[in-house]
Structure formats: structure tokens, C-alpha cells
Amino acid sequence: MPANRLEILTDLVNQNPGDSRTRYMLAMELANTGNLERAVAEYRAIIEADAGYIPAYFHCGQALARLGRTDEAREVYRRGIEACERAGDSHTREEIEEALAALD
């Protein structure tokens, strides 16, 4: 039986790897516990499988920036802005644009 939230979420993702919401919850938990490399891998998996899952772009960019990987963060943010435009999500687009500008 899983002992903690991270183990539970990992088990849930392993059971249903195509569930973007559960994978996003895992990525957020990983980021919150300081495992940024693994969080980035999970955010990237979401983006590749579900390009319309917009929050993954923002948080992936944040994690990359925290890791000092600003060029990669910029690219993820740009892709997130494009996803926001496709979805008509102007609010999140503005947040991502602000995060992108803050990298400079």
C-alpha cells in the first residue's frame, strides 16, 4: 500500500498514464517536494500527449527556470502561449507572457 501522496499519485499515473490531470497532480507534487527534474519530465509528458493541457506549460516553464534552464523555459512558455491562443485562453496567456518577460 502506498505510504504517501507522491507514491499514491505515481501509482495512479502508472495505472492510467494517459490521464493528464493525474499526471499534472503528480508533477505538481514533485515540484512542491523539490524534485524539479522529475517534475519537468512529467510536465513534458503531459504536453506531448495533450498539447491543450495549458497549465502544464506554465508550471514546466517555472520548474525549468528554477533549474536555471532559461532557454528551455522560454521555449516551453512560447509553446504555452501558442496553446493559449488556440484555446482562446487570454488570462493564462497573459500569465505565461509575464513569466516569459521575467526571464529577461
Image (tube, rainbow, N blue to C red):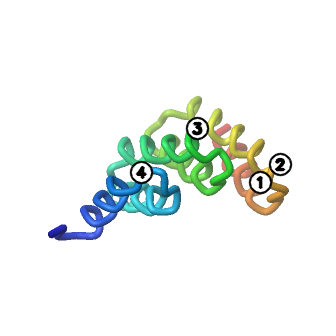
Mark 3–mark 1 Cα distance, whole angstroms, equals 15 Å
Disc on the earlier residue, 3 or 4: 4
Q: Give neighbour class at mark 2: few <14, some 14-19, many 20+ (Cα, 10 Å).
A: few
Is 69 positioned to the left or the right of 5 in the image?
right
Estimate the x, y position of residue 6 in percent, counting from the top left: 29, 63
Q: Give neighbour class at mark 4: few <14, some 14-19, many 20+ (Cα, 10 Å).
A: some
Q: Which residue is mark 3?
A: 73
- Which label sits in the foreground, 2 or 3? 2
Q: Give neighbour class at mark 3: few <14, some 14-19, many 20+ (Cα, 10 Å).
A: many
Q: What's the mark number on residue 85?
A: 2
Disc on the earlier residue, 1 or 2: 2
Question: Looking at the image, which residue is at 50% across and 33% down?
Answer: 69
Q: What's the mark number on residue 38?
A: none
Mark 1–mark 2 Cα distance, whole angstroms, equals 7 Å
Mark 3–mark 4 Cα distance, whole angstroms, equals 24 Å
Q: Which residue is mark 1?
A: 93
Question: Looking at the image, which residue is at 61% across and 57% down?
Answer: 55
Type of amino acid at the residue the image marks with label 4: Pro
Q: Which structural element holds mark 4?
A: loop
